[in-house]
């Protein structure tokens, strides 16, 4: 989701990487001056309020379960 100048927005499955932009058929909708852009911005702000900063220290202090899952996900990530 992208929002610009409270007037323009894009929502969809588009990722900003090489595969997504040149090889995959992903989909997005461009919105211009529609009321739902305010809803998108409100949703973004609500999500941002639930986020936390990830630092080297916070990664070091993660539970063992999450560290093991991270390692497993790195193995299968290229297949996704």
Image (tube, rainbow, N blue to C red):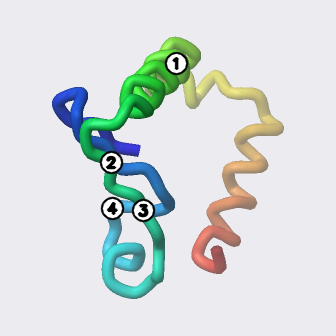
Q: Residue at x 34, y 67 (%)?
A: 17
Q: Visible in this render: residue 56?
A: no
Alpha-carbon neighbours of circle 4 within 10 Å: few (<14), some, or many (≥20)? Answer: few
Q: Residues within 10 Å of mark 1 (few under 14, many from 20)?
A: few
Q: Residue at x 64, y 22 (%)?
A: 61
Q: Residue at x 17, y 30 (%)?
A: 5
Query: Is the residue marked by circle 3 packed among few (<14), some (14-19), or many (20+) residues within 10 Å?
Result: few
In front: 52, or 15? 15
Tell me: residue 24, above or below residue 28. Answer: below
18 to 46, vertically: above or below: below
Disc 1, SS? loop
Q: Determine whether label 1 and label 3 are within 8 Å by CB.
A: no
Q: Which residue is mark 2?
A: 31
- Horizontal and vertical percent position of residue 16: 33, 61
How far separated are the C-alphas under marks 3 and 4? Answer: 12 Å
Q: CA distance from mark 1 to mark 4?
A: 23 Å
The reply to whether callout 1 and callout 4 are in contact (CB within 8 Å) is no
Q: Which mark is residue 52?
A: 1
Answer few, some or many: residues within 10 Å of disc 2's Cα (few below 14, many 20 plus, some between 14 and 19): some
Question: Which callout, 3 or 4, points at the residue further toward the start of the chain?
Answer: 4
Q: Which residue is mark 4?
A: 16
In the image: residue 35, left or right of residue 58: left
Name the residue beneath numbered marker 3.
28
Horizontal placement of 45 versus 60: left or right? left
The x, y position of residue 19, in whole percent, is 39, 79
Q: Secondary structure at mark 3?
A: strand
* Cα–Cα gap, marks 3 and 2: 10 Å
Q: CA distance from mark 1 to mark 3?
A: 28 Å
Residue 42 or residue 23, whichever sits in front: 42
**Which label's residue is closer to the chain start, 1 or 2?**
2
Q: Among all residues in the image, which is located at the extreme bottom?
A: 23
Give above or below for 47 relative to 36.
above
């Amino acid at each position: 989701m992208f929002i610009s100048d409270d007037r323009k927005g894009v929502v969809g499955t588009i990722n900003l990487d090489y595969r997504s932009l040149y090889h995959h058929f992903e989909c997005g909708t461009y919105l211009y001056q529609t009321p739902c852009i305010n809803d998108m911005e409100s949703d973004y702000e609500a999500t941002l309020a639930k986020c936390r900063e990830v630092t080297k220290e916070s990664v070091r202090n993660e539970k063992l379960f999450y560290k093991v899952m991270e390692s497993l996900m790195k193995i299968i990530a290229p297949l996704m």
